[in-house]
Image: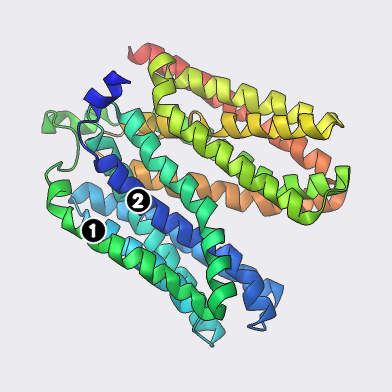
Amino acid sequence: MSESRKSLPNKLPYLLMGGHICVDASQAGLAAVLPYLVLDGGLTYAAATLLVLASNIASAVIQPLFGWLGDKKARPWLMAVGVALAGAGLAAIGLLKSYWLIVAAAMVSGIGNAMLHPEGGRLANLVGGNDKAVSMSVFSVGGQVGFCVGPIISVAAINAFGLAGTLVYLVICLPYAALLLVFNRRFLSFGLREQVAEGVQAAHDRWGAFWVVMGALSVRSIVFYGVTSFVPLFMVATFGMEQGSASALITVFSLAGAAATAMSGLASHKVSIPALMVGGFCLIGSAMLVFVFCHNLALCVAMLMLIAVGTNIFNPPAVALSQSYLPAHLGMASGLSFGVAVAVGGVVSPLLGTVGDAVGLAPVLLLLAAFSFVGLICSLATMRIEKKRQ
Protein backbone atom coordinates (compact mmCIF):
# COMPACT_ATOMS: atom_id res chain seq x y z
CA MET A 1 0.00 0.00 0.00
CA SER A 2 2.87 2.38 0.73
CA GLU A 3 4.10 1.85 -2.82
CA SER A 4 0.78 3.08 -4.17
CA ARG A 5 0.92 6.16 -2.00
CA LYS A 6 4.36 7.00 -3.32
CA SER A 7 3.22 6.42 -6.87
CA LEU A 8 0.08 8.55 -6.51
CA PRO A 9 1.39 11.65 -4.71
CA ASN A 10 -1.72 13.71 -5.55
CA LYS A 11 -5.47 13.28 -5.39
CA LEU A 12 -6.11 14.14 -9.03
CA PRO A 13 -7.13 10.57 -10.02
CA TYR A 14 -9.97 10.87 -7.51
CA LEU A 15 -11.01 14.22 -9.00
CA LEU A 16 -11.10 12.57 -12.43
CA MET A 17 -13.11 9.70 -10.93
CA GLY A 18 -15.77 12.19 -9.82
CA GLY A 19 -16.18 13.45 -13.37
CA HIS A 20 -16.47 9.86 -14.56
CA ILE A 21 -19.21 9.26 -11.99
CA CYS A 22 -21.17 12.27 -13.26
CA VAL A 23 -21.16 11.37 -16.95
CA ASP A 24 -21.80 7.65 -16.48
CA ALA A 25 -24.56 8.34 -13.95
CA SER A 26 -26.17 10.49 -16.64
CA GLN A 27 -25.79 7.72 -19.22
CA ALA A 28 -27.17 5.02 -16.92
CA GLY A 29 -29.84 7.36 -15.59
CA LEU A 30 -31.27 7.75 -19.09
CA ALA A 31 -32.25 4.06 -19.22
CA ALA A 32 -34.16 4.46 -15.94
CA VAL A 33 -36.12 7.42 -17.39
CA LEU A 34 -37.46 5.37 -20.32
CA PRO A 35 -40.38 3.67 -18.49
CA TYR A 36 -41.63 7.08 -17.34
CA LEU A 37 -41.40 8.45 -20.87
CA VAL A 38 -43.52 5.53 -22.05
CA LEU A 39 -46.10 5.68 -19.26
CA ASP A 40 -46.27 9.43 -18.69
CA GLY A 41 -44.88 10.81 -21.93
CA GLY A 42 -46.76 8.56 -24.33
CA LEU A 43 -43.71 7.23 -26.19
CA THR A 44 -43.73 3.79 -27.77
CA TYR A 45 -41.16 1.22 -26.66
CA ALA A 46 -39.30 1.57 -29.95
CA ALA A 47 -39.23 5.36 -29.68
CA ALA A 48 -38.00 5.19 -26.08
CA THR A 49 -35.21 2.72 -26.80
CA LEU A 50 -34.09 4.87 -29.74
CA LEU A 51 -33.05 7.48 -27.17
CA VAL A 52 -30.52 5.11 -25.62
CA LEU A 53 -29.27 4.12 -29.07
CA ALA A 54 -28.90 7.78 -30.09
CA SER A 55 -27.02 8.62 -26.90
CA ASN A 56 -24.69 5.62 -27.13
CA ILE A 57 -23.93 6.13 -30.82
CA ALA A 58 -23.20 9.83 -30.30
CA SER A 59 -20.90 8.92 -27.43
CA ALA A 60 -19.05 6.02 -29.04
CA VAL A 61 -18.55 7.44 -32.52
CA ILE A 62 -17.27 10.83 -31.42
CA GLN A 63 -14.94 9.74 -28.61
CA PRO A 64 -11.93 9.00 -30.87
CA LEU A 65 -12.34 12.50 -32.36
CA PHE A 66 -12.01 14.11 -28.96
CA GLY A 67 -9.08 11.81 -28.28
CA TRP A 68 -7.40 13.00 -31.48
CA LEU A 69 -8.00 16.63 -30.49
CA GLY A 70 -6.55 15.96 -27.04
CA ASP A 71 -3.41 14.49 -28.60
CA LYS A 72 -2.89 17.64 -30.67
CA LYS A 73 -3.29 20.04 -27.76
CA ALA A 74 -4.09 19.49 -24.10
CA ARG A 75 -7.70 20.49 -23.53
CA PRO A 76 -8.65 19.47 -19.98
CA TRP A 77 -11.53 21.92 -20.08
CA LEU A 78 -13.26 19.41 -22.38
CA MET A 79 -13.93 17.31 -19.27
CA ALA A 80 -15.80 20.17 -17.59
CA VAL A 81 -17.86 20.87 -20.72
CA GLY A 82 -18.54 17.14 -21.04
CA VAL A 83 -19.84 16.83 -17.49
CA ALA A 84 -22.06 19.89 -18.00
CA LEU A 85 -23.48 18.62 -21.31
CA ALA A 86 -24.06 15.08 -20.01
CA GLY A 87 -26.12 16.45 -17.12
CA ALA A 88 -27.87 19.18 -19.11
CA GLY A 89 -28.91 16.82 -21.90
CA LEU A 90 -30.53 14.38 -19.49
CA ALA A 91 -32.08 17.20 -17.45
CA ALA A 92 -33.77 18.56 -20.60
CA ILE A 93 -35.33 15.21 -21.48
CA GLY A 94 -37.83 15.48 -18.64
CA LEU A 95 -38.98 18.94 -19.76
CA LEU A 96 -39.17 18.71 -23.54
CA LYS A 97 -42.38 17.77 -25.33
CA SER A 98 -41.16 17.34 -28.91
CA TYR A 99 -39.87 13.83 -29.51
CA TRP A 100 -37.06 14.89 -31.83
CA LEU A 101 -35.92 17.52 -29.35
CA ILE A 102 -35.80 14.74 -26.76
CA VAL A 103 -33.66 12.67 -29.16
CA ALA A 104 -31.39 15.69 -29.63
CA ALA A 105 -31.10 16.11 -25.86
CA ALA A 106 -30.14 12.43 -25.51
CA MET A 107 -27.45 12.93 -28.15
CA VAL A 108 -26.16 16.04 -26.35
CA SER A 109 -25.85 13.96 -23.18
CA GLY A 110 -23.99 11.28 -25.15
CA ILE A 111 -21.63 13.87 -26.63
CA GLY A 112 -20.91 15.13 -23.12
CA ASN A 113 -20.05 11.58 -22.12
CA ALA A 114 -17.72 11.35 -25.13
CA MET A 115 -15.93 14.57 -24.20
CA LEU A 116 -14.86 13.36 -20.77
CA HIS A 117 -13.55 9.86 -21.44
CA PRO A 118 -10.59 10.48 -23.81
CA GLU A 119 -9.24 13.48 -21.90
CA GLY A 120 -10.00 11.88 -18.53
CA GLY A 121 -8.34 8.62 -19.55
CA ARG A 122 -5.30 10.47 -20.93
CA LEU A 123 -4.91 12.48 -17.73
CA ALA A 124 -5.51 9.45 -15.51
CA ASN A 125 -2.49 7.94 -17.24
CA LEU A 126 -0.31 11.03 -16.80
CA VAL A 127 -1.25 11.97 -13.22
CA GLY A 128 -0.69 8.37 -12.09
CA GLY A 129 3.05 8.85 -12.07
CA ASN A 130 4.79 5.51 -11.69
CA ASP A 131 1.57 3.59 -11.05
CA LYS A 132 -0.69 4.14 -14.01
CA ALA A 133 -2.67 0.95 -13.39
CA VAL A 134 -3.78 2.17 -9.94
CA SER A 135 -4.63 5.61 -11.29
CA MET A 136 -6.60 4.05 -14.15
CA SER A 137 -8.44 1.76 -11.73
CA VAL A 138 -9.44 4.78 -9.62
CA PHE A 139 -10.73 6.55 -12.73
CA SER A 140 -12.55 3.42 -13.92
CA VAL A 141 -14.28 2.90 -10.57
CA GLY A 142 -16.05 6.16 -11.29
CA GLY A 143 -17.75 4.57 -14.28
CA GLN A 144 -18.89 1.59 -12.23
CA VAL A 145 -20.24 3.82 -9.46
CA GLY A 146 -21.96 6.05 -11.99
CA PHE A 147 -23.77 3.12 -13.59
CA CYS A 148 -24.88 1.97 -10.13
CA VAL A 149 -26.20 5.30 -8.83
CA GLY A 150 -27.60 6.78 -12.07
CA PRO A 151 -30.80 4.69 -12.14
CA ILE A 152 -31.29 5.24 -8.39
CA ILE A 153 -31.03 9.02 -8.82
CA SER A 154 -33.42 9.05 -11.79
CA VAL A 155 -36.10 6.92 -10.14
CA ALA A 156 -35.96 8.81 -6.83
CA ALA A 157 -36.09 12.23 -8.48
CA ILE A 158 -38.91 11.39 -10.91
CA ASN A 159 -40.98 9.71 -8.19
CA ALA A 160 -40.62 12.87 -6.11
CA PHE A 161 -41.05 15.57 -8.78
CA GLY A 162 -42.40 13.90 -11.91
CA LEU A 163 -40.51 13.94 -15.19
CA ALA A 164 -39.15 17.39 -14.27
CA GLY A 165 -37.11 15.56 -11.64
CA THR A 166 -34.47 14.99 -14.32
CA LEU A 167 -33.35 18.54 -13.47
CA VAL A 168 -31.52 16.96 -10.53
CA TYR A 169 -28.69 16.20 -12.98
CA LEU A 170 -28.06 19.93 -13.35
CA VAL A 171 -27.66 20.17 -9.59
CA ILE A 172 -25.14 17.32 -9.67
CA CYS A 173 -23.20 18.00 -12.86
CA LEU A 174 -22.90 21.77 -13.15
CA PRO A 175 -21.09 22.30 -9.80
CA TYR A 176 -18.71 19.45 -10.58
CA ALA A 177 -18.02 20.90 -14.01
CA ALA A 178 -17.08 24.16 -12.28
CA LEU A 179 -14.77 22.24 -9.93
CA LEU A 180 -12.98 20.64 -12.87
CA LEU A 181 -12.47 24.09 -14.40
CA VAL A 182 -10.82 25.25 -11.17
CA PHE A 183 -8.17 22.55 -11.69
CA ASN A 184 -7.78 23.23 -15.42
CA ARG A 185 -4.36 24.91 -15.06
CA ARG A 186 -3.12 22.07 -12.86
CA PHE A 187 -4.16 19.54 -15.48
CA LEU A 188 -2.48 21.59 -18.20
CA SER A 189 0.83 21.29 -16.34
CA PHE A 190 0.95 17.58 -17.22
CA GLY A 191 1.13 18.35 -20.93
CA LEU A 192 0.23 15.85 -23.62
CA ARG A 193 2.30 12.78 -22.82
CA GLU A 194 5.21 11.42 -20.87
CA GLN A 195 8.38 13.46 -21.12
CA VAL A 196 10.45 11.47 -23.62
CA ALA A 197 12.35 12.52 -26.69
CA GLU A 198 9.86 14.13 -29.04
CA GLY A 199 11.60 12.86 -32.14
CA VAL A 200 11.11 9.18 -31.28
CA GLN A 201 7.45 9.33 -30.34
CA ALA A 202 6.13 8.01 -33.65
CA ALA A 203 8.49 5.05 -33.49
CA HIS A 204 7.11 4.13 -30.08
CA ASP A 205 3.54 3.83 -31.32
CA ARG A 206 2.73 0.14 -31.72
CA TRP A 207 -0.69 -0.01 -33.32
CA GLY A 208 -0.63 -3.77 -33.86
CA ALA A 209 -0.10 -4.47 -30.17
CA PHE A 210 -2.73 -1.87 -29.32
CA TRP A 211 -5.38 -3.58 -31.46
CA VAL A 212 -4.66 -6.93 -29.82
CA VAL A 213 -5.50 -5.43 -26.42
CA MET A 214 -8.50 -3.69 -27.99
CA GLY A 215 -9.72 -7.12 -29.08
CA ALA A 216 -9.63 -8.31 -25.48
CA LEU A 217 -11.36 -5.14 -24.25
CA SER A 218 -14.06 -5.53 -26.92
CA VAL A 219 -14.73 -9.13 -25.86
CA ARG A 220 -14.92 -7.96 -22.26
CA SER A 221 -17.58 -5.43 -23.35
CA ILE A 222 -19.58 -8.13 -25.15
CA VAL A 223 -19.60 -10.27 -22.00
CA PHE A 224 -20.56 -7.32 -19.81
CA TYR A 225 -23.49 -6.27 -21.99
CA GLY A 226 -24.55 -9.89 -22.46
CA VAL A 227 -24.64 -10.58 -18.73
CA THR A 228 -26.54 -7.41 -17.85
CA SER A 229 -29.03 -7.94 -20.68
CA PHE A 230 -29.75 -11.68 -20.51
CA VAL A 231 -28.90 -13.01 -17.05
CA PRO A 232 -32.05 -11.56 -15.41
CA LEU A 233 -34.21 -13.12 -18.14
CA PHE A 234 -32.38 -16.43 -17.72
CA MET A 235 -32.98 -16.39 -13.96
CA VAL A 236 -36.68 -15.72 -14.46
CA ALA A 237 -37.01 -18.52 -17.02
CA THR A 238 -34.85 -21.06 -15.16
CA PHE A 239 -35.66 -20.43 -11.49
CA GLY A 240 -38.98 -18.61 -11.72
CA MET A 241 -37.57 -15.55 -9.98
CA GLU A 242 -39.62 -12.37 -9.87
CA GLN A 243 -38.48 -9.77 -12.37
CA GLY A 244 -37.54 -7.29 -9.65
CA SER A 245 -35.37 -9.83 -7.85
CA ALA A 246 -33.72 -10.95 -11.07
CA SER A 247 -32.94 -7.35 -12.04
CA ALA A 248 -31.52 -6.72 -8.57
CA LEU A 249 -28.88 -9.35 -9.32
CA ILE A 250 -27.42 -6.95 -11.89
CA THR A 251 -26.98 -4.34 -9.16
CA VAL A 252 -25.09 -6.95 -7.13
CA PHE A 253 -23.10 -7.84 -10.26
CA SER A 254 -22.22 -4.15 -10.73
CA LEU A 255 -21.16 -3.74 -7.09
CA ALA A 256 -18.94 -6.83 -7.27
CA GLY A 257 -17.51 -5.45 -10.51
CA ALA A 258 -16.81 -2.09 -8.87
CA ALA A 259 -14.95 -3.82 -6.04
CA ALA A 260 -12.88 -5.82 -8.55
CA THR A 261 -12.16 -2.63 -10.50
CA ALA A 262 -10.98 -0.90 -7.34
CA MET A 263 -8.60 -3.78 -6.60
CA SER A 264 -7.34 -4.16 -10.18
CA GLY A 265 -4.52 -1.64 -9.86
CA LEU A 266 -3.13 -3.31 -6.76
CA ALA A 267 -3.57 -6.72 -8.37
CA SER A 268 -1.34 -5.55 -11.23
CA HIS A 269 1.45 -5.10 -8.65
CA LYS A 270 1.38 -8.83 -7.93
CA VAL A 271 0.62 -10.23 -11.37
CA SER A 272 1.52 -8.96 -14.83
CA ILE A 273 -1.27 -7.28 -16.77
CA PRO A 274 -1.39 -9.96 -19.51
CA ALA A 275 -1.58 -12.63 -16.78
CA LEU A 276 -4.50 -10.74 -15.21
CA MET A 277 -6.19 -10.72 -18.61
CA VAL A 278 -5.63 -14.45 -19.06
CA GLY A 279 -6.92 -15.20 -15.57
CA GLY A 280 -9.94 -12.96 -16.05
CA PHE A 281 -11.08 -14.66 -19.24
CA CYS A 282 -10.46 -18.14 -17.81
CA LEU A 283 -12.62 -17.19 -14.83
CA ILE A 284 -15.35 -15.78 -17.06
CA GLY A 285 -15.50 -18.85 -19.30
CA SER A 286 -15.44 -21.48 -16.56
CA ALA A 287 -17.90 -19.62 -14.31
CA MET A 288 -20.27 -19.07 -17.24
CA LEU A 289 -20.32 -22.79 -18.04
CA VAL A 290 -21.14 -23.65 -14.44
CA PHE A 291 -23.78 -20.90 -14.39
CA VAL A 292 -25.56 -22.33 -17.43
CA PHE A 293 -25.53 -26.00 -16.46
CA CYS A 294 -25.99 -25.92 -12.70
CA HIS A 295 -29.52 -25.79 -11.31
CA ASN A 296 -28.70 -24.47 -7.87
CA LEU A 297 -29.72 -20.85 -7.31
CA ALA A 298 -27.04 -20.07 -4.72
CA LEU A 299 -24.32 -21.54 -6.92
CA CYS A 300 -25.58 -19.53 -9.90
CA VAL A 301 -25.37 -16.32 -7.87
CA ALA A 302 -21.84 -17.23 -6.77
CA MET A 303 -20.83 -17.84 -10.39
CA LEU A 304 -22.32 -14.48 -11.37
CA MET A 305 -20.08 -12.79 -8.78
CA LEU A 306 -17.05 -14.62 -10.18
CA ILE A 307 -17.98 -13.46 -13.69
CA ALA A 308 -18.13 -9.90 -12.33
CA VAL A 309 -14.63 -10.29 -10.90
CA GLY A 310 -13.27 -11.83 -14.10
CA THR A 311 -14.83 -9.09 -16.23
CA ASN A 312 -13.40 -6.21 -14.21
CA ILE A 313 -10.18 -7.31 -12.53
CA PHE A 314 -8.07 -6.67 -15.63
CA ASN A 315 -9.99 -3.85 -17.35
CA PRO A 316 -8.25 -0.67 -16.03
CA PRO A 317 -4.72 -2.14 -16.19
CA ALA A 318 -5.45 -3.37 -19.72
CA VAL A 319 -6.54 0.13 -20.73
CA ALA A 320 -3.30 1.49 -19.23
CA LEU A 321 -1.36 -1.16 -21.16
CA SER A 322 -3.10 -0.20 -24.41
CA GLN A 323 -2.13 3.42 -23.78
CA SER A 324 1.49 2.41 -23.29
CA TYR A 325 1.49 1.11 -26.87
CA LEU A 326 0.45 4.56 -28.17
CA PRO A 327 2.53 7.01 -26.10
CA ALA A 328 2.09 9.77 -28.69
CA HIS A 329 -1.67 9.24 -28.87
CA LEU A 330 -2.88 8.78 -25.29
CA GLY A 331 -6.12 10.60 -26.04
CA MET A 332 -6.86 8.48 -29.09
CA ALA A 333 -6.05 5.32 -27.14
CA SER A 334 -8.44 6.42 -24.38
CA GLY A 335 -11.19 7.32 -26.84
CA LEU A 336 -10.95 3.97 -28.58
CA SER A 337 -10.68 1.98 -25.34
CA PHE A 338 -13.56 3.71 -23.55
CA GLY A 339 -15.65 4.44 -26.64
CA VAL A 340 -15.31 1.98 -29.49
CA ALA A 341 -14.50 -1.07 -27.34
CA VAL A 342 -17.56 -0.42 -25.18
CA ALA A 343 -19.73 0.21 -28.25
CA VAL A 344 -18.87 -3.25 -29.59
CA GLY A 345 -20.76 -4.78 -26.70
CA GLY A 346 -23.77 -2.58 -27.38
CA VAL A 347 -23.78 -3.57 -31.05
CA VAL A 348 -23.41 -7.31 -30.44
CA SER A 349 -26.04 -7.44 -27.68
CA PRO A 350 -29.07 -7.09 -30.04
CA LEU A 351 -27.58 -9.81 -32.25
CA LEU A 352 -27.38 -12.08 -29.23
CA GLY A 353 -30.99 -11.18 -28.50
CA THR A 354 -31.93 -12.46 -31.96
CA VAL A 355 -30.19 -15.74 -31.13
CA GLY A 356 -32.09 -15.88 -27.84
CA ASP A 357 -35.43 -15.37 -29.61
CA ALA A 358 -34.60 -18.21 -32.00
CA VAL A 359 -33.07 -20.88 -29.76
CA GLY A 360 -33.33 -19.75 -26.13
CA LEU A 361 -31.16 -17.98 -23.57
CA ALA A 362 -28.87 -20.86 -22.58
CA PRO A 363 -27.20 -20.88 -26.02
CA VAL A 364 -26.70 -17.11 -25.72
CA LEU A 365 -24.82 -17.53 -22.44
CA LEU A 366 -22.78 -20.35 -23.99
CA LEU A 367 -21.87 -17.94 -26.78
CA LEU A 368 -20.59 -15.54 -24.11
CA ALA A 369 -18.40 -18.36 -22.79
CA ALA A 370 -17.14 -18.90 -26.35
CA PHE A 371 -16.38 -15.19 -26.68
CA SER A 372 -14.31 -15.42 -23.51
CA PHE A 373 -12.13 -17.96 -25.34
CA VAL A 374 -11.52 -15.33 -28.05
CA GLY A 375 -10.56 -12.89 -25.30
CA LEU A 376 -8.21 -15.51 -23.89
CA ILE A 377 -6.47 -15.82 -27.27
CA CYS A 378 -6.01 -12.02 -27.41
CA SER A 379 -4.66 -12.10 -23.85
CA LEU A 380 -2.15 -14.84 -24.62
CA ALA A 381 -1.04 -12.85 -27.67
CA THR A 382 -0.59 -9.81 -25.42
CA MET A 383 1.50 -11.90 -23.04
CA ARG A 384 3.74 -12.89 -25.95
CA ILE A 385 4.03 -9.25 -27.07
CA GLU A 386 5.04 -8.18 -23.55
CA LYS A 387 7.69 -10.90 -23.29
CA LYS A 388 9.26 -9.66 -26.52
CA ARG A 389 8.94 -6.08 -25.32
CA GLN A 390 10.95 -6.86 -22.17
Could you say where residue 41 lies in the image, as x and y percent from the top left? 63, 83
Report the quarter where the N terminus lies. top left
Q: Is residue 338 visible?
A: yes
- Position of 61 relative to 363 (above/below): below
Q: Is residue 257 left or right of residue 233?
A: left
Which residue is rendered at x = 44% and y = 50% of the image? 339
Indicate the secondary structure of the residue bearing disc 1.
Answer: helix
Residue sticking out furthest to the front: 160
Residue type (three-letter) at the residue carrying disc 2: Gly
Q: Is residue 168 above or below residue 224?
A: below
Q: Position of residue 66 (x, y in %)?
A: 31, 55
Q: Quadrant of the C terminus?
A: top left
Tag 2 residue: 18
Looking at the image, which residue sits at the far bottom? 97
- Tell me the crowding category of disc 1: few under 14, some 14 to 19, or many 20 or more residues within 10 angstroms, Cα based: some
Classify residue 224 by image quadrant.
top right
Disc tally is 2
Question: x%, y% of residue 329?
Answer: 27, 40
The disc, 1 or 2, on the residue closer to the chain's N-terminal end is: 2
Give the labeled residue for mark 1.
Answer: 179
The answer to whether one can see residue 222 in this image is no
Quote the CA–CA distance across marks 1 and 2. 10 Å
Q: Horizontal and vertical percent for residue 197? A: 11, 28
Tell me what residue is drawn at x 45 percent, y 78 percent: 92
Residue flagged by tag 1: what amino acid is it?
Leu
Using the image as rendered, state which of residue 307 and residue 370 is in the foreground: 307
Q: 85 and 115: which one is in front?
A: 85
- Given contact means CB atoms under 8 Å apart, are the residues at marks 1 and 2 in contact? yes
Residue at figure coordinates x 67%, y 77% from the top left: 38
19 vs 28, left or right, is left
